[in-house]
């Protein structure tokens, strides 16, 4: 089956027809990109009409004709071939004796030029009648070569390289394993591709697990929009300041790949959400542009309440602004779960029509007490009472407004399942669940399958991740007991000694680099004091370390030859091969339910920073209980097994909301109305049960038998 990703195109009718034909063919498997990729050339960015990447037939580029005149198709096909060839020849793995190892197929698709068909000289021009036969008649592509071609086209070949060259002498060391993970070709899946390429004339949201590639997707999206629209003013914003350096590196890499030039940084702004006079930000510039009073962190918290400062400051600014300066053509927001709704409304207000705003988030990484509202509520209402933003149901041929990234490319299955189990409290004793998804089916949307039981209120369910959503190579490099370990200590000194000894071994025997290691303290208020002794001991051993945002620039997280210590907030959005979480006992329990979900989400976020190995360290009885909880997770083979709470029980838990859009709610309402109509017809005798097909009666009987 072919999946279509819709980018910008000035040939909509023929592009839609091509997509319909390929999607309707059972013999073609792959992804059809419309208006993508954009390749950098000496003449500047070159956008393709359409390109098919298929594991069966490889790479097929389309020269699309919208009208009846095909024009100089020979010249256009030659130009397309030359540009793809020049791009792929840059990758040694694709070169054999000065020639490409893979094949490049080019075809002109002209559905309205029915009388003009050309099959000679390898310059095919085809309409509806021959295009499917042409594609299915192509030779099979080498699967290994196809993976490299896909990564090259998607500009992903450089993003997983280490910050500096790694010297590996032992084939089975941690350094060697991490190098193998980094060298693995990572291709965008269909959902990630859609998130990069498809841009709506309005608001779009991207939801995804930790490690699902949200930050990379946003950086690629900026590069794509910049290449297609170099005059647009684009802003990228986020909550964690240390993400700035990462975004600069990724956007610079991707823009060069797509335009052959450095980004025009006058038109791309990478800004912290808050900002100040010494570091520009969205809120700060809003106040400056509209001549409004600016509130810094301390002032805002004092005025509007502890933890409510930014929300209050944004609401104040919005209410006081009279003639808002609209300065951006697109704004992309990362980590939206940690930003108040008022900030998203502020961003919306400074966008030029049609107000292109993309926000990405993972509700489970929220480090605040608030939950994300649905888009209709999030962006407020017009004076007439109608929502400023309404998500419509997805229709073929249109970019998606709502995209879910279900695959995790950072955390192995045991690591991610442990993080979820601890975050939700699946095996917590006593007490059980802490939070739950409002819509049961969201478990499937984030990559879990039902192993046993039923995903229904009041029923036992066993959920597991699959190789599709948690690729096996992420865990096959090491024994499960080495991927994630919990360690209990009697006091802080013993914890520090174990940590120091382990880091020293990582650097002297395991062939890890200092920048492969993060040490996370979950409580942001105690981090500076909690890490002091360990850092001093490492210094005595000749091992340099930094406290992120304190001993270095707030915009920088990693440094070469430096082990990074950090609080949980600055750890957001970053990853490392080896993650040590200290004082994890602080995340076990709390007298206050709201605080319990917050500290469990801190633990979830800390665990999911790991690309390979996690060590969870803590002190005392609470750490013993937390380790016992992990032991139960491991004993259940990293499946999540529990009784799904009833509607009444859910009222006692924090609800993780799927944020049903208005279109989705209307769809559910229509289905219920249709069902009521059928039942009424059966009751009235207008339709007899025996009129229903036997297979349908059997399915209905099974469904109703499970209803209590």
Image (cartoon, rainbow, N blue to C red):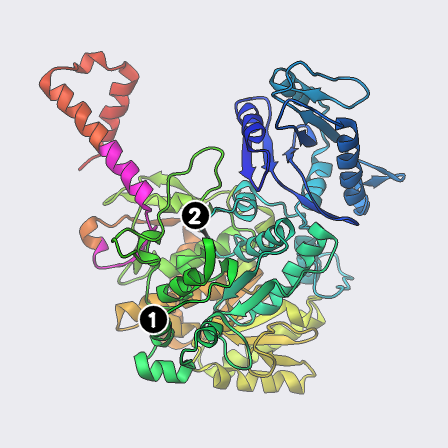
Q: Mark 2 points at which residue?
A: 446
Farthest residue to the left: give it: 684
Where, by quadrant of the figure, is residue 172 drawn? Answer: bottom right
Q: Horizontal and vertical percent for residue 576?
A: 60, 64
Return the residue nearer the eye: 376 or 367: 376
Q: What are the residue bounds of the magenta stretch?
A: 650-672
Badge number at residue 343: none
Return the residue nearer the eye: 652 or 460: 652
Q: Where 22 falls versus 510 (above or below)?
A: above
Q: Name the residue under label 1.
A: 315
Q: Is residue 219 magenta?
A: no
Q: Can residue 655 be seen in this view?
A: yes
**Local SS, label 2:** loop
**Local SS, label 1:** helix
Q: In this view, does 676 lie to the left or right of 380?
A: left
Q: Nearer the viewer, mark 1 or mark 2?
A: 1
| Residue in view at x 51 percent, y 63 percent | 327
Q: How far apart are marks 1 and 2 (CA)?
A: 33 Å
Farthest residue to the front: give it: 323
Give whichever of discs 1 and 2 has the lower sequence position.
1
Q: Horizontal and vertical percent for residue 613?
A: 57, 61
- The C terminus - image quarter: top left
- The N terminus - image quarter: top right
| Residue in view at x 48 percent, y 37 percent | 398
């Amino acid at each position: 089956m072919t999946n279509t990703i819709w980018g910008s195109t000035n040939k909509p009718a023929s592009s839609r027809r091509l997509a319909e034909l390929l999607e309707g063919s059972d013999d073609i498997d792959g992804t059809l990109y419309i208006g993508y990729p954009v390749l950098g050339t000496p003449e500047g960015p070159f956008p393709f009409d359409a390109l098919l990447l298929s594991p069966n037939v490889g790479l097929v580029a389309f020269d699309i004709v919208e009208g009846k005149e095909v024009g100089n198709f020979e010249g256009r096909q030659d130009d397309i071939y030359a540009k793809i060839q020049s791009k792929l020849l840059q990758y040694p793995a694709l070169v054999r004796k000065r020639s490409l190892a893979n094949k490049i197929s080019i075809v002109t698709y002209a559905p309205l030029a029915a009388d003009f068909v050309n099959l000679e000289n390898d310059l095919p021009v085809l309409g509806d009648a021959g295009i499917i036969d042409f594609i299915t008649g192509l030779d099979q592509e080498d699967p290994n070569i196809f993976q490299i071609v896909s990564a090259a086209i998607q500009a992903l070949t450089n993003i997983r390289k280490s910050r500096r060259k790694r010297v590996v002498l032992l084939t089975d060391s941690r350094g060697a394993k991490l190098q193998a993970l980094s060298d693995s070709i990572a291709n965008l899946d269909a959902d990630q591709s859609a998130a990069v390429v498809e841009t709506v004339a309005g608001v779009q949201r991207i939801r995804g697990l930790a490690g699902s590639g949200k930050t990379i997707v946003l950086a690629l999206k900026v590069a794509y929009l910049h290449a297609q629209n170099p005059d647009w003013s684009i802003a990228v914003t986020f909550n964690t300041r240390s993400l700035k350096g990462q975004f600069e590196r990724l956007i610079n890499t991707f823009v060069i790949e797509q335009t052959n030039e450095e980004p025009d940084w006058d038109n791309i702004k990478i800004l912290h959400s808050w900002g100040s006079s010494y570091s520009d930000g969205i809120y700060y510039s809003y106040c400056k542009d509209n001549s409004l009073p600016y509130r810094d962190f301390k002032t805002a918290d004092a005025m509007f309440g502890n933890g409510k400062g930014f929300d209050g400051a944004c609401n104040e600014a919005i209410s006081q602004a009279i003639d808002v300066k609209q300065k951006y053509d697109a704004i992309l927001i990362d980590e939206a779960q940690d930003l108040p709704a008022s900030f998203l409304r502020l961003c919306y207000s400074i966008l030029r029509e049609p107000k292109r705003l993309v926000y990405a988030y993972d509700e489970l990484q929220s480090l605040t007490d608030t939950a994300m509202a649905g888009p209709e509520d999030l962006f407020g209402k017009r004076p007439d009472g109608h929502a400023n933003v309404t998500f419509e149901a997805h229709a073929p041929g249109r970019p998606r407004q709502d995209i879910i990234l279900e695959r995790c490319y950072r955390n192995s299955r045991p690591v991610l399942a442990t993080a979820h189990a601890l975050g939700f409290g699946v095996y917590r004793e006593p007490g059980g669940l802490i939070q739950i998804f409002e819509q049961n089916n969201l478990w499937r949307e984030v990559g879990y399958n039902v192993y046993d039981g039923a995903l229904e209120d009041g029923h036992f369910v066993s959920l597991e991740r699959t190789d599709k959503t948690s690729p096996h190579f992420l865990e096959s490099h090491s024994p499960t007991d080495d991927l994630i370990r919990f360690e209990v200590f009697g006091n802080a000194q013993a914890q520090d000694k174990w940590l120091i000894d382990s880091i020293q071994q990582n650097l002297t025997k395991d062939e890890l680099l200092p920048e492969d290691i993060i040490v996370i303290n979950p409580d942001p208020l105690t981090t500076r004091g909690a890490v002091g002794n360990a850092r001093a001991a490492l210094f005595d051993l000749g091992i340099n370390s930094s406290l992120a945002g304190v001993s270095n620039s707030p915009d920088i997280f990693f440094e070469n030859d430096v082990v990074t210590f950090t609080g949980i907030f600055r750890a957001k959005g970053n990853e490392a091969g080896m993650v040590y979480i200290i004082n994890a006992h602080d995340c076990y329990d709390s007298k206050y339910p709201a605080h319990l979900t917050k500290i469990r989400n801190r633990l979830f976020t800390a665990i999911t920073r790991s690309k390979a190995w996690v060590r969870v360290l803590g002190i005392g009885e609470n750490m013993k209980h937390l380790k016992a909880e992990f032991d139960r997770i491991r004993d259940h083979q990293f499946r999540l097994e529990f009784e799904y709470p009833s509607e009444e029980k859910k009222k006692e838990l924090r609800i993780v909301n799927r944020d049903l859009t208005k279109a989705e709610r209307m769809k559910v309402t229509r289905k219920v109305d249709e069902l009521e109509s059928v039942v009424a017809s059966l009751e009235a005798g207008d339709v007899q049960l025996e009129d229903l097909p036997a297979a349908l009666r059997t399915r209905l009987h099974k469904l109703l038998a499970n209803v209590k």
